[in-house]
Image (cartoon, rainbow, N blue to C red):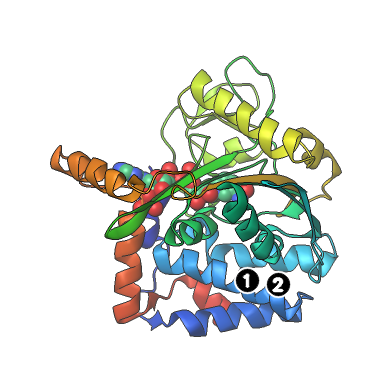
């Protein structure tokens, strides 16, 4: 199963209760502030969590708030971090997140990123010393809505993925995302882990006592299993697509950790205190301004390409499900899940 594809169904209140985006974001924000986040950090994280919930990325919506609170309360993540932004060359921006969260650190570099794009048409943004605990699409969609092509990748934290041949987990679920603007329409944005299933979805399925398809992961002896608990507790998740997914994880670790100066997943895992949910990682963003790069026809060409794909029968493109959920939420509110009810109560 695809977590995002099925996510709307998780624990939705049978009473059909709904909540507005602003009300949900405000509730999350106040929890984060109470746990020690600065108002600026809380605002960015709350908006991100509420957006994931609204769009049906439930594996990274309100479900994640408890993990944020835990990291803040333990002092493991710095809720009032002041990111340092260093423009190391005209298109290369380095950010040290001061052990805070990645999204506020990225937001703090907005002016430098815009300047790099204006000067060169490209911004390579290397974040280190930051925790990323969410989906990647919110930041990428925002770049694409400003007319930019963007991609992002993370050395995401927990050692969880066992490629064929390895006797223990060596990668994280290493997400990768890409976004492009499209003339006359919403951006196309894809965003997925390079594992057969994301860690968040496995946790949700474990909580519901559900099984996963063979090929999703292995137990501690390396044997296939359908049990999420066995995979999460001492076993491992398989990369998607065999060696191809494994080597994408290799590329992501190399860029998001090696190039940024952040920790590789095997280093992150070793330093993290027992039981924490967020990890001090590295993230890499590459943002391109097609117009500044000399191609004013880009947006229309992508439009033509997408029209061809839809005409050929690809009537489900990445982002379609989220945009449909978003439109429904704008009309009727966000469905109140058990997780949201617990947060509000
Ligand atoms: P999924 O397998 O659910 O795939 C998600 C992507 O594929 C979305 O862009 C989705 O579009 C698209 N998609 C799904 N089904 C189809 C289809 N049939 N046709 C076309 N496109 C489709 O993602 P994962 O479970 O692997 O990852 C979920 C989230 O977890 C991601 O947002 C990722 O960033 C996040 N993550 C974060 C980590 C972190 O450390 N911060 C670690 C690992 C994962 P749509 O959105 O429209 O459904």
Residue 243 visible: yes
Residue drawn 55% across the image and 67% down it? 49
Which secondary structure, mark 1? helix
Would residue 126 appear left or right of 140 to someone viewing this image? right
Instruction: Check if mark 1's residue and mark 2's residue have beta carbons within 8 Å.
Output: yes
Indicate if the residue with disc 1 has its beta carbon within 8 Å of ligand 1.
no
Give the residue number, with chain letter if any, for mark 2.
41
- Classify 248 as above or below 201: above
Quarter of the figure with the N terminus:
top left
The label on residue 44 is: 1
Which of the labelled discs sits on residue 211, or is there none?
none
Give the image quarter of residue 269.
top right
**Rounded to the nearest whole Å, what is the CA distance between mark 1 and mark 2?**
5 Å
- Whether residue 199 is visible here, answered yes or no, is no
Q: Pinpoint residue 84: horizontal percent, then vertical percent.
A: 82, 59
Determine the residue positioned at 46% across, 61% down.
146
Rendered residue at 29%/63% (across/down): 324
- Residue 188 at x, y percent in the picture: 36, 51
Q: Tell me if the residue at label 2 has its CB under 8 Å from ligand 1.
A: no
Q: Residues within 10 Å of mark 1 (few under 14, many from 20)?
A: some
Q: Is residue 212 above or below residue 181?
A: above
Percent position of residue 172, x then y:
65, 37
x then y, percent, for residue 159: 70, 36
Of 126 and 89, nearer the camera is 89
Label 2 packing within 10 angstroms: few (<14), some (14-19), many (20+): many
**Closer to the camera, 283 or 218?**
283
Give the quadrant of the C terminus. bottom right
Outermost residue to the top: 165
User: Please, is residue 254 above or below residue 200 in the view?
Assistant: above
Q: Is residue 134 left or right of residue 86?
A: left
Q: Secondary structure at mark 2?
A: helix
């Amino acid at each position: 199963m695809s977590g995002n594809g099925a996510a709307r169904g998780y624990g939705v209140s049978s009473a059909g209760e709904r909540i507005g985006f602003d009300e949900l974001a405000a509730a999350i924000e106040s929890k984060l502030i109470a746990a020690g986040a600065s108002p600026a950090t809380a605002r960015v994280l709350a908006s991100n969590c509420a957006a994931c919930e609204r769009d049906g990325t439930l594996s990274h919506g309100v479900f994640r708030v408890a993990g944020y609170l835990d990291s803040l309360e333990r002092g493991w993540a710095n809720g009032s971090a002041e990111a340092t932004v260093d423009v190391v060359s005209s298109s290369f921006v380095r950010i040290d997140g001061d052990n805070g969260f990645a999204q506020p650190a990225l937001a703090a570099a907005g002016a430098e990123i815009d300047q790099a794009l204006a000067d060169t048409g490209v911004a390579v943004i290397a974040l280190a010393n930051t925790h990323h605990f969410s989906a990647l699409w919110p930041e990428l969609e925002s770049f694409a809505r400003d007319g930019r092509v963007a991609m992002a990748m993370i050395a995401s934290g927990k050692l969880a993925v066992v490629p064929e041949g390895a006797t223990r987990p060596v990668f994280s679920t290493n997400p990768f995302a890409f976004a492009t603007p499209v003339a006359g329409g919403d951006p196309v944005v894809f965003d997925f882990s390079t594992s057969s299933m994301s860690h968040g979805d496995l946790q949700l399925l474990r909580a519901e006592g559900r099984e996963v398809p063979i090929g999703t992961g292995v137990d501690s002896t390396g044997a296939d299993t359908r049990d999420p608990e066995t995979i999460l507790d001492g076993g491992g998740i398989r990369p998607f697509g065999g060696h191809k997914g494994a080597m994408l994880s290799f590329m992501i670790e190399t860029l998001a950790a090696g190039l940024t100066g952040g920790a590789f997943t095997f280093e992150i895992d070793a330093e993290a205190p027992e039981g924490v949910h967020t990890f001090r990682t590295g993230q890499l963003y590459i943002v391109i301004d097609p117009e500044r790069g000399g191609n004013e026809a880009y947006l229309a060409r992508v439009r033509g390409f997408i029209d061809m794909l839809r005409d050929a029968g690809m009537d489900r493109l990445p982002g379609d499900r989220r945009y449909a959920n978003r439109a429904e939420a704008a009309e009727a509110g966000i469905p109140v899940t058990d997780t949201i009810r617990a947060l509000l109560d």
